[in-house]
Amino acid sequence: MIAAADKRRAFRKLHESGCFVIPNPWNVGSAVYLQGLGFKALATTSSGHAHSLGLADGDASKELVLAHYRELANAVDIPVNADFENGYAHEPAEVAANVTLCVETGVAGLSIEDFTGDESNPLYDFDLALARVKAARKAIDDAGGDVVFTARTEGFIHGRTDMDETVHRLKAFADAGADCLYAPGIKTREQIETVVKAVAPKPVNLLMSFSGGFTVDDIAAIGVRRISVGGTLARVAMDAFIKSARSLAGGSFESFDGVVSNAELNTFFDDHNSKK
């Protein structure tokens, strides 16, 4: 098994140059398969994990989520970044305590967002949001400082599409010690370029949950360092399941034709386990 410290060094190095895709598995099987395809790092998905438990996004408990991080981090030999949502706390001291627990799971990186959980008032006031970032930064430093810290501002996915405010927050988060910056929901070339330039030379994570006419090379050329897909892969799987289940409920087995075979999956996972 690769040590957590080695995974963290590898993850930090990935952020130094170039552009990499960090797909989001939702369980051990999907994580192992993505590793087998050659991806250099993975990220968790809060929605994909919650849906796999029969819960809405955001409804999984802190204990369930931390156990999930530990399970994924132990299952693969590549770095795993944790989508730690709002740190499962509002006040900075509680965020710091929970970040410490998150680091202890063995993840190579984690993100903290400024979403309050209340759609009527979705973003923490600026000063509190900044204090939460500083608290998370200190907790990571106190734990050794090797975990890559991503700070997120959530306005664009919660109806607050103000680019000036987004840039203001990201720049402040960068100055407060975030290693990577992230504004999920930005989509246009102009928006992406604005964010990349605003926090340069620090790396930016871009969420791609639709094609948008972009390729990985296009996004790399804009200057994005890391591309994640959030819960999209999990939804792709759920979408295929739903369509097949509905077809079955209607009396047809046609959706079973052409799917990956049990033998192929057995061979893949047998090969993976034999290399441990």
Image (cartoon, grey):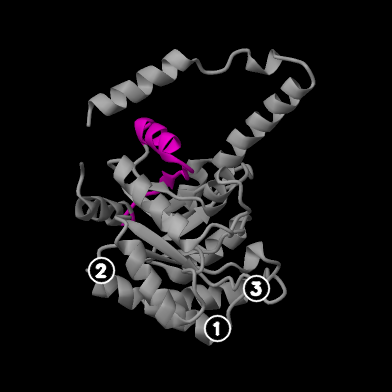
Q: Is residue 21 visible?
A: yes
Q: Is residue 228 magenta?
A: no
Q: Amino acid at mark 2?
A: Gly
* Numbered disc 3: secondary structure: loop
The residue at which mark 1 appears reads as 126
Mark 2 / mark 1, whichever is N-terminal: 1
Could you tell me how far apart the alpha carbons at marks 2 and 1 are, in whole angstroms?
25 Å
- The answer to whether the residues at label 2 and label 1 have Cβ atoms under 8 Å apart is no
The residue at which mark 2 appears reads as 145
* Numbered disc 1: secondary structure: helix
**x, y percent for residue 149:** 37, 65
Q: Is residue 28 magenta?
A: yes
Q: Residue at x 52, y 18 (%)?
A: 260
Q: Residue at x 33, y 69 (%)?
A: 100
Could you tell me how far apart the alpha carbons at marks 1 and 3 are, in whole angstroms?
12 Å
**x, y percent for residue 124:** 58, 79
The residue at which mark 3 appears reads as 122
Q: Is residue 160 left or right of residue 47?
A: right
Is the N terminus in the top left, top right, bottom left or bottom right quadrant? top left
Mark 2 / mark 3, whichever is N-terminal: 3
Q: Residue at x 43, y 52 (%)?
A: 226
Q: Amino acid at mark 3?
A: Pro
Magenta stretch? 15-38
